[in-house]
Amino acid sequence: MELLTEDIRAALPRINFWGRNPTVHVRYFTLDRQRLWYVTSGCQQGPDYYFHGFVIGDGAEWRTFTLAQLEGIDGVVRDTSFRPCRIADALRSGIAWPERRT
């Protein structure tokens, strides 16, 4: 599965965009349900693509991370059922782990 499609690239505002309640455009997760990435912005910088978003794993915090970093983690997939929404709405409902697909 392609983690970063052209449609996602086109939808993401540049990383320098900051808002109080930004829109989450894409969600990634690990198949073992240990980590979630709620991506709110991104941009190409040199040979890599950089994302900014809210990451839940060992803790929960806003982070900047790269496509190469995501691709280097075993079992990372894009949640194809996720629909863009405000981060507050995504988090208000609790951590909704995507259903496992076999």
Image (cartoon, rainbow, N blue to C red):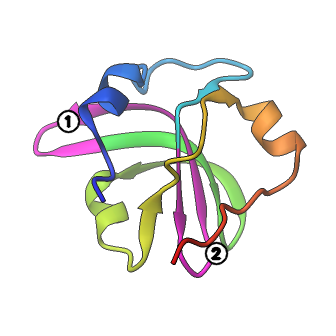
Residue 71: image quadrant is bottom left
Q: Residue at x 41, y 41 (%)?
A: 51
- Give the mark nearest the N terminus, 1 or 2: 2
Q: What residue is drawn where x is 42% and y is 27%? A: 15
Above-or-below relation of 54 to 73: above
Residue 83 place in picture, x, y as percent: 61, 34
Drawn side of residue 14 relative to residue 36, left or right: left
Occupied quadrant, residue 19 = top right
Element on which disc 1 rests? strand
Give the residue type at disc 2. Answer: Arg
Residue bearing the label numbered 1: 45
Extreme residue toward the front, this view: 102
- The quadrant in which residue 87 appears is top right
Asked if residue 21 is among those painted magenta in the image, a careful observer would answer no
- Magenta stretch mostly in which secondary structure? strand
Q: Hey, which residue is sitting farthest left in the picture?
A: 47
Residue 73, percent from left and from top = 38, 75
Magenta-highlighted residues = 27-49
Please identify the quadrant where the N terminus is shown.
bottom left
Residue that label 2 marks? 33
User: Relative to residue 35, is residue 68 depicted above or below?
Assistant: above
Residue 56 placement, left or right of 16? right
Secondary element under disc 2, as helix, strand or loop, is loop
Whole-Å distance between the Cαs marked 1 and 2?
A: 29 Å
Pick whichever, 43 or 34, lies toward us. 34
